[in-house]
Amino acid sequence: QVQLVESGGGLVQPGGSLRLSCAASGIIFSTYGMGWYRQAPGKQRELVAGISSGGHTNYADSVKGRFTISRDNAKNTVYLQMNNLKPEDTAVYYCNRVSYLLGPSTFGSWGQGTQVTVSS
């Protein structure tokens, strides 16, 4: 059974940075494309960044140039470096799998997420 544990969120001022981590277990991590999703209050969950098993990446237009997704297969961990954060980035951030084409997908369950709040 897959387990996803997100961490690294917090309160940051506009223009600040955070690095999120997601540790996965119960899967052969290196064979899956992975992604970061977020859900803001009153909004649907959206995919913001994806990385294939081979390291190819894709980003939502809203975060392109500010966020960087990476992975460490030896640690079964995917990261999201977030720079130049904006108030509209405020959301709960989750990791999960992505499809072969780096589109939304899931393992069928979600972790607890990590809260990111961007506010002065």
Image (spheres, rainbow, N blue to C red):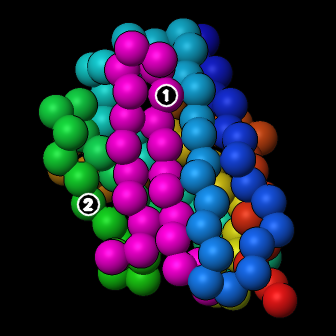
Residue 6, quarter of picture: top right
- Spatial CA distance of label 1 from label 2 is 18 Å
Q: Is residue 80 above or below residue 3?
A: below
Q: Residue at x 63, y 60 (%)?
A: 18
| Image: magenta residue range | 65-86
Type of amino acid under label 2: Asn
Image position of 93 (left or right of 56): right
Type of amino acid under label 1: Thr
For label 2, the residue is 58
Q: Is residue 82 above or below residue 22?
A: below
Q: For mark 1, does the 10 Å Cα neighbourhood hold few (<14), some (14 to 19), or many (20 or more) residues?
A: many
Local secondary structure at mark 1: strand
Image position of 85 (left or right of 97): right
Q: Is residue 78 magenta?
A: yes
Query: Percent position (x, y) of residue 65?
Result: 33, 76
Q: Is residue 119 magenta?
A: no
Disc on res. 1: none
Disc on res. 77: 1
